[in-house]
Image (spheres, rainbow, N blue to C red):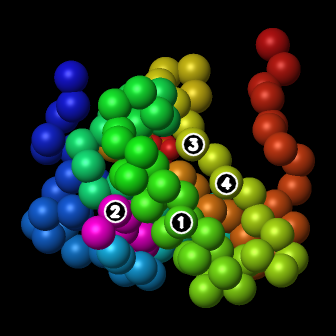
Amino acid sequence: MYDSQNIFARILRGEIPCRKVYEDEFALAFHDIMPKAPVHILVIPKGAYIDLPDFGQRATSSEIQGFFKAVAKIASDQGLSHQGFRSIANTGVHGGQEVPHFHLHLLGGGPIGPMVHRETV
Ligand code: AMP
């Protein structure tokens, strides 16, 4: 069940500030508080969705379209589209998701390096 007290829900309600990059009817984008790249932006849908599968299953076609149109605009406006960037949607425990409101990380501004670093066991 969606936790309406998660930090991104609180940012959406204006209870916690963020360094806003973009906002429209479908999406809010802001700088990650602990950036992992020269540019590290989080894009979140306005609706209450826990993770990527939840968004894919329950969001309306216009919410999904609006969200990804926003992602494309943000990537272009922030100068990420020309040289490229990485987008990551961590999901659940194995995905290392910390905040249970669906979000897409946009990482760029320089080479991001290997796709995944996995600890050897
Ligand atoms: P994830 O592990 O995919 O759930 O990513 C959560 C991200 O949210 C992390 O990269 C955090 O640094 C970021 N984060 C947590 N709290 C805030 C906040 N108040 N403002 C901006 N980013 C945040």
Cα–Cα gap, marks 2 and 1: 9 Å
**In the displayed structure, does residue 96 sit left or right of residue 14?**
right
Looking at the image, is 18 positioned above or below residue 42?
Answer: below
Q: Name the residue carrying label 2.
A: 26
Tell me the residue at 13%/63% (across/down): 13
Cα–Cα gap, marks 3 and 1: 16 Å
Q: Name which of mark 1 and mark 4 comes first in the sequence.
A: 1
Report the front residue among 41 and 113. 41
| Residue type at tag 1 | Lys
Q: Assign the C terminus to one quadrant of the image.
A: top right
Tell me the residue at 50%/69% (across/down): 70
Q: Nearer the viewer, mark 3 or mark 2?
A: 2
Q: What stretch is highlighted in magenta?
A: 25-30
Report the front residue among 88 and 69. 69
Report the front residue among 31 and 71. 71
Q: Does the residue labelled 3 lie within 8 Å of ligand 1?
A: yes
